[in-house]
Image (cartoon, helix red, strand yellow):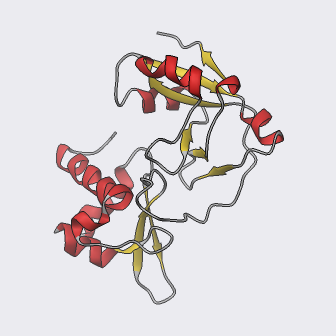
Amino acid sequence: MTGLSREQVRVSRRLALVLRHRPESAGLALDANGWVPVADLLAALGLTRDELDLVVAGNDKARFAIARRDDGTDWIRASQGHSRGVDVDLGLEPAEPPSVLFHGTPRDNLASILREGLRPRSRHHVHLSPDVPTALNVGGRRSSDVVVLRVAAGELAAGGHVFHRSANGVWLTSFVPAERLSEEPTNP
């Protein structure tokens, strides 16, 4: 997480846990669209607004969004990546993807993905990147031996497959069949 101190990275990870996977771990409940009042989050996590704003602004992937409601209160949510057990509707409209998207993953996953396709597993959606460097970065979070897969997104969309684009540019879809995947050459 570029630009964040060690403590800010710790806070960012805690925010991701609470806002994407286990809001109840902080005594919070997300609304139907994944939002929670900023004041409630600050109280639950013992943070100041300045600390939160630094983490949100410094997160290189814009994982979190803050919005002001008509009543003047600020609310926060994770932009995407929620676990299946967290029932949220991000309200994302279907979007026409570019002809090609990418997915970075540890090489150990390659054989099963090429057999079974990309599945969301414990998440609501499969996450796809708009370019190879981003896919390498995403895949590199779990392994130094990363492979990038080319996704024939345009062909899938033409066949009726639905895509969404989150506020931070991550492309989301429910499933990518193996026959629409190929290994993308990357420079070592």
Q: Quadrant of residue 78?
A: bottom left
Q: Quadrant of residue 101?
A: top right
Nearer to me, 150 or 124: 124
Q: Position of residue 164 (x, y in %)?
A: 65, 51
Find the residue positioned furthest to the top: 188
Relative to 93, residue 156 above or below: above
Q: Position of residue 17 (x, y in %)?
A: 30, 54
Find the residue positioned furthest to the right: 158
The residue drawn where x is 31% and y is 65% is 23
Nearer to me, 178 or 11: 178
The residue drawn where x is 60% and y is 16% is 183
Q: Position of residue 46 (x, y in %)?
A: 16, 69
Q: In which quadrant of the rendered image does the N terminus lie?
A: top left
How many numbered tags mark residues here?
A: 0
Q: Is residue 107 visible?
A: yes
Nearer to me, 135 or 50: 135
Q: Quadrant of residue 49?
A: bottom left
The residue drawn where x is 43% and y is 28% is 139
The residue drawn where x is 71% and y is 49% is 162
Find the residue positioned furthest to the bottom: 71
| In the image: residue 47, left or right of residue 84 | left
Q: Position of residue 97 (x, y in %)?
A: 72, 42
Q: Is residue 47 visible?
A: no
